Amino acid sequence: MKAVVLRSAEAALRRASSSSCTSSHLLRRSYSSESHPERKVAVLGAAGGIGQPLALLMKLNPLVSTLSLYDIAGTPGVAADVGHINTRSEVAGFMGEEQLGQALKGSDVVIIPAGVPRKPGMTRDDLFNINAGIVKSLCIAIAKYCPNALVNMISNPVNSTVPIAAEVFKKAGTYDERKLFGVTMLDVVRAKTFYAGKSKVPVAEVNVPVVGGHAGITILPLFSQATPKSNDLSDEEIKALTKRTQDGGTEVVEAKAGKGSATLSMAYAGAIFADACLKGLNGVSDVVECSFVQSNITELPFFASKVRLGKNGVEEVLGLGPLSDYEKQGLESLKPELQASIEKGIKFAHQN
Ligand SMILES: NC(=O)c1ccc[n+]([C@@H]2O[C@H](COP(=O)([O-])OP(=O)(O)OC[C@H]3O[C@@H](n4cnc5c(N)ncnc54)[C@H](O)[C@@H]3O)[C@@H](O)[C@H]2O)c1
């Protein structure tokens, strides 16, 4: 029974892997834990809508040896539940600020889905006032207890929470730009799904880089670079795919009608991105995914693009590649909004 479950889990992860920005690194996945180093992953906000399925998916990841689940409430139950799954990692739940240090200590990767999600009619920026404070306090603790960890920021607005984290780490003297990531993977996941549906190519083979930021028009999918190539898509169809990718989060928020935003697809995207980070840390070569990172590929200080991951986090921020005229236009239009969101985050970090 155990072997059957593991084989089907492996098959599912292989399918997921082959749809990733670069797939070869993930195809080397193995369920043998012997060859993998010890890795501690902490999830902050682990009892939430994203946190719970993300905890489950990280428990299925054989690269994880310790899974630390932290939230202000509810983590003992989540940890007890997930902890009964017979995979490699040891699971521990931590609740309340006094246990945050213990939850973080020794972490290699910290994933942050803590905060409030959107309701219909809200933009990601409307979450700023609450989530900025949460992210800031969590990052102060990260700087203290696991300053070398790779930080995967999911909490919105990512365009501002990543700059907040950077400022907190700078103030603490622990900032390493290679180790801070805004998780924009869900935009990539959506772009792949929508592109495959429209162009009738097998979704598992699809690759679409998504650049810019993670809100509305700052999300810029580069369908001109999508593979496998589809020559059948008209300009109008590319525009519609772009808009659907940009509005994907709102589509889910409206469908959930007040009960939150994307959680399951976000947990999947977060798990795929954390897996890529772990593979990079473990020295697997050619791990490339899109992420919102400190960047100089445009004039903006943070920007999402393909990045090569390695033993210290970001090894290389890859350039944008050739853009269509429509994408060039999209790139220029997104810059003022993205710049303003970055500045808002930096200002918050300095004033609070
Ligand atoms: N990056 C993305 O693509 C993306 C996609 C979807 C949602 N999000 C964002 O992820 C965040 C979480 O969404 P959700 O649907 O899981 O929300 P949720 O309300 O279901 O869960 C959030 C969890 O965070 C916890 N929390 C609150 N303050 C905390 C603190 N100080 N320390 C630790 N935990 C704390 C809450 O107790 C709760 O369990 C939101 O900001 C949402 O906008 C990002």
Image (cartoon, grey):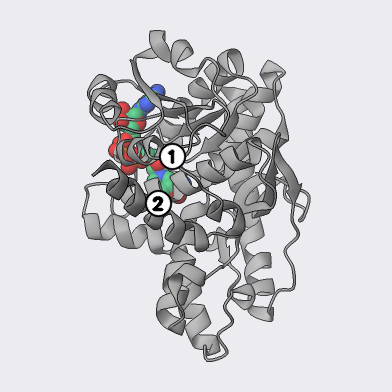
Which amino acid type is marked by label 1? Answer: Asn
**Residue on which the image places disc 2:** 10
Mark 1 highlights which residue? 61
- x, y percent for residue 185: 51, 53
Quarter of the render that holds ligand 1: top left
The quadrant of the picture occupied by the C terminus is top right
Residue 140 locus on image (x, y percent)? 56, 18
Determine the CA span between mark 2 and mark 1.
10 Å
**Tag in front: 2 or 1:** 2
Q: Residue at x 44, y 26 (%)?
A: 134
Q: Residues within 10 Å of mark 2 (few under 14, many from 20)?
A: some
**Residue 115 visible in the current orientation:** yes
For residue 88, which quarter of the picture? Answer: top left
Instruction: Identify the residue at horizontal 69%, vertical 72% (top origin).
Output: 328
Q: Judge by depth and name the residue closer to the eye, 264 or 34.
A: 34
Closer to the chain start, of discs 2 and 1, is 2
Is disc 1's CB within 8 Å of ligand 1? no
Instruction: Report the quarter where the N terminus lies.
Output: top left
